């Protein structure tokens, strides 16, 4: 079933802002919805090909299956939670509550989740905690503003996490890396800057392997590193 | 350059209704059976036990 929604500002005509109401950000956006109108799976911008659409459709079908099985099967519930994290459908509070509930169910049923999946869910939750920490540095600031002292403090804490773990997924907000780089630069710590830049480069190789904006971005940071090392 | 400037002026002068009508006349909407109303799409998807593939675009610039 094909559905096209057009944002518009025609007075009195409905559905002029449906995209925003559904939480879809990009223009244009593509997503699979269920017959209740709920967004299941978004089609990434770099996957808008026949194969990409087929893959997203299969993922949406899997989403519906897992959602139906989740109430009675903890393994399906874990896989569904993972999918919802991946689709960025949960807030930190919702994700934490769902994960706690799932672990409780596993305990009650003496069921053991796949260790790799459990670690991934923990990491996804950490992604949301990091996102919340970054958002806090913008709270109370003018539009686009940031509390630089809080931002660098977050970067310092993130650096400790990078060294000691636990680690977020590569899909964590890029602000995680930017905050660490900002902290390392402000502290004139070339070794830390290099350490973060290497890890950021590895994460981008996973999350944005073909993105044209990546090489110039990394080159700018490498130039900063060279300047730091020359000091 | 001149064409872009003319287009910018034309777009500036378009009303929201005209922008929407222009978008609704887009060729891609004629090439496939798109539903343009969410309630209708939902009802048809429920009846056919299908999912909905939604394409979300804009009438504005």
Image: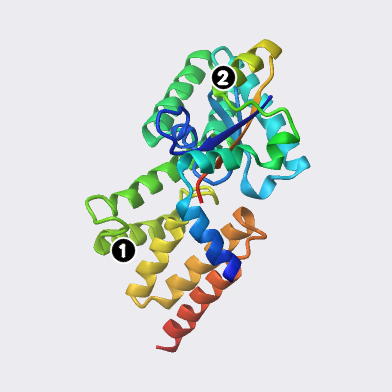
Q: From the viewer's side, name the closer residue of B25 and B59.
A: B25
| Residue at the farthest left position | A140
Q: Nearer the viewer, mark 1 or mark 2?
A: 1
* Residue B12 position (above or below residue A191): above
Which residue ends up furthest to the bottom in the rendered image? A230
Quadrant of the image containing the N terminus of chain A: top right
Q: Position of residue A82 (x, y in %)?
A: 56, 33
Q: Looking at the picture, tell me which residue is in the foreground, A140 or A105.
A: A140
Where is residue A178 shown, x and y percent of the image? 43, 63
Q: Tell me the residue at 63%/59% (across/down).
A: A205
Which numbered circle lies on residue A74? 2
Chain under callout 1: A
Q: Is residue A227 above or below residue A133?
A: below
Looking at the rendered image, the quarter that the C terminus of chain A falls into is: bottom left
| Mark 1 → mark 2, Cα distance in angstroms | 40 Å
Hey, which quadrant is residue A128 in on the image?
top left
User: Image quadrant of residue A187?
Assistant: bottom left
Q: Position of residue A186 (x, y in %)?
A: 33, 73
User: Badge 1 is on which residue?
Assistant: A152
In the image, residue A1 above or below residue A83? above
Who's the residue at 65% across and 15% down the image? B44
Image x and y of residue A175, in percent = 42, 57
């Amino acid at each position: 079933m094909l559905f096209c929604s057009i944002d518009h500002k025609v007075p009195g005509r409905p559905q002029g802002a449906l995209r925003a109401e559904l939480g879809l950000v990009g223009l244009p956006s593509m997503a699979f919805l269920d017959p209740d109108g709920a967004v299941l799976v978004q089609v990434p911008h770099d996957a808008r090909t026949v194969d990409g659409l087929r893959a997203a459709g299969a993922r949406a079908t899997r989403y519906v299956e897992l959602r139906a099985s989740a109430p009675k099967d903890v393994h399906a519930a874990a896989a569904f939670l993972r999918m919802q994290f991946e689709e960025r459908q949960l807030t930190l509070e919702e994700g934490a509550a769902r994960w706690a509930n799932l672990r409780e169910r596993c305990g009650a049923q003496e069921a053991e989740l796949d260790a790799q999946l459990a670690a991934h869910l923990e990491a996804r939750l950490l992604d949301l905690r990091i996102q919340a920490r970054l958002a806090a540095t913008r709270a109370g600031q003018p539009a686009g503003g940031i509390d630089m002292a809080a931002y660098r403090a977050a970067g310092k804490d993130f650096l400790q996490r990078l060294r000691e773990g636990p680690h977020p997924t590569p899909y964590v907000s890029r602000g995680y890396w930017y905050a660490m780089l900002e902290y390392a630069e402000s502290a004139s710590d070339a070794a830390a800057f290099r350490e973060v830049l290497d890890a950021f480069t590895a994460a981008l190789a996973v999350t944005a392997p073909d993105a044209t904006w990546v090489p110039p971005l990394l080159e700018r940071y490498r130039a900063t590193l060279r300047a730091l090392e020359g000091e | 350059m001149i064409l872009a400037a003319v287009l910018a002026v034309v777009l500036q002068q378009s009303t929201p209704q005209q922008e929407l009508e222009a978008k609704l006349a887009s060729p891609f909407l004629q090439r496939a059976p798109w539903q343009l109303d969410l309630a209708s799409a939902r009802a048809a998807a429920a009846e056919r036990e299908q999912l909905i593939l939604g394409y979300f675009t804009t009438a504005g610039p």
